[in-house]
Image (spheres, grey):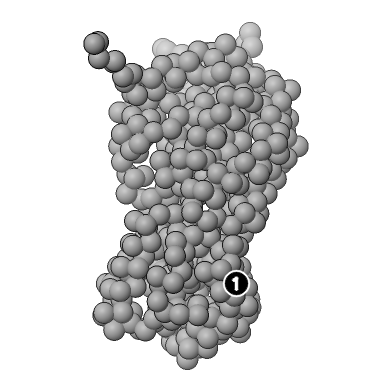
Amino acid sequence: MTEMVRPDPSQILLETFSKAQRAFRATPYADCVERRKRLATLKQLLLDNRAQLCAAIDRDFNGRSMVETQIAEFLPTLMAINDANRQLKGWMRAERKWLHLLFQPAGAQVLPQPLGVIGIIVPWNYPLLLSFGPLIGALAAGNHALIKPSELTPAFGSLLVSLIEQYFDVGLVTVVNGDIELAQAFAALPFQHLFFTGSIGVGRAVLRAASDNLTPVTLELGGKSPVVIDRSMPVREAAERLVFAKCLNAGQTCVAPDYILCPDERVSDFVQHFLSEVKRQYGDIAQNDHYTAIIDARQRDRLTEYVDEARAAGASVFVAGPTDDLAYYGHKLPPILLTNLPAGCRLLVDEIFGPLLPILSYHRLDEALNYINDRPRPLALYVFGYEQELRPLFSLKTHSGALIFNDAVLQVGMANIPFGGVGASGMGHYHGRFGFETFSKLKPIIAKQRVSSLKLLYPPYKAWLVNLILRVFGR
């Protein structure tokens, strides 16, 4: 019997990419009407299949809050599509530029031109939002796209393949599923732009793979996003706002508060208010369908190991639930606050990406500032306090992807605010016009007329004329 030859996934991936390239070259500059049509198709896909998509994500998580999927993934995606449709004509408009008198007579404009085929590598924590968020910018800019969902969300990935094939023309948007090896091959394709959301370690590997093709890369990473609570805000109020931000998706959010810097005399009060607020909002987490599970056993084990390590080193551990026995919660993990942490423990070094919340104390505000500035620049910095001097202080003396006062995580849903990291938390940004420009080449177009003033500078050079030009135009 002849052995069946299995197709090479890398070869299939390359053929899929080539098909997308050919489709783009057939329409290299889609007009505004066509781009709006594509965005409308994406919106219709979401509206028609909301229940199916929510159910697929729920299966992948072994318990994902349907409400959270709708408010944290569907809602911001739909808002972003609506914003892009409203403003697309203005984004596409070529911008006229004034040229210096030395170059006159001439005209100049900057035209946003589509790049080509965009690659989008999607993480598991918000599979819909982080697939379609970058896709909105890519389609608005007139590009085609290949999307690689995470291997940890197979139900969502499989459904997305069938829906994209149903709603979009071949070669316009394509979804490819596969393991880590396929993801590596995906990152090595010669895209015109590669967009990655995920961990710092994988981000480095993606950047290395893309470098062989000199592919421009946007990295949306994470890191440790700190919270500073100032004495000018009651800790009860800070706790109320932070419970939602930390518990959303069970803390599996790149911009989730990672650790708290709290005035030393208020740490105990903050812990008690936070625990009370968790109980008020969620009750018994194990029985609450509105609280999301940890994505898989490996991630849950990683988080519980952090807790065990910290407890063994002398940290105080506070579990927000009816029992400290973590087995009681099944696939879920309740919020766990930790104080008196020893320096250097993994909870204070690694990105947590879960519902664990270390609390560090400070006496003077400059201690909190120094702690933040001594560490890699975070994706987000959250400052809770009502003193007016806090805004210029943190705005000018810290660096972060975003700076938010008196709330957290809301920046993710703002379509007209640039979203992106700095340093270890990422490079580049997207959302709204910023995403449109990320996926465009802002191409200058310069047109000279019959008269050319530059002839005055042709050889043979005249020293007196060069000196005159320097004197007039170089001041």
Residue projecting furthest to the right = 86
Q: Is residue 191 visible?
A: yes
Dividing the picture into quadrants, the one containing residue 391 is bottom right
Q: Secondary structure at mark 1?
A: helix
Residue 414 pos. (x, y %)? 65, 51
Image location (x, y in percent) of residue 402: 53, 58
* Callout 1 amino acid: Tyr
The foreground one among 399 and 317 is: 317
Q: Residues within 10 Å of mark 1 (few under 14, many from 20)?
A: many
Residue located 41% across and 12% down the image:
460
- Quarter where residue 461 is shown: top left
Residue indicated by mark 1: 282
Extreme residue in the top direction: 450
* Depicted 185 relative to depicted 370: above or below: above
Observer able to see residue 434: no
Identified at 35% across, 68% down, the residue is: 304
Above or below, 80 relative to 469: below
- x and y percentages locating residue 42 in the rendered image: 66, 32
Residue at the image point whose x is 49% and y is 66% from the top: 257
Task: Give the quarter of the figure containing the N terminus.
Answer: top left
In this rendering, would 422 be left or right of 133? left
User: Measuring 63% from the left and 73% from the top, which residue is drawn there?
Assistant: 281
Q: Using the image as rendered, state which of residue 341 and residue 429 is in the foreground.
A: 341
When the figure is inspected, residue 256 is found, relative to residue 162, above or below; the finding is below
Place of residue 238 in the rendered image (x, y in percent of width and height, measured from the top left) = 59, 77
187, 325: nearer the viewer: 325
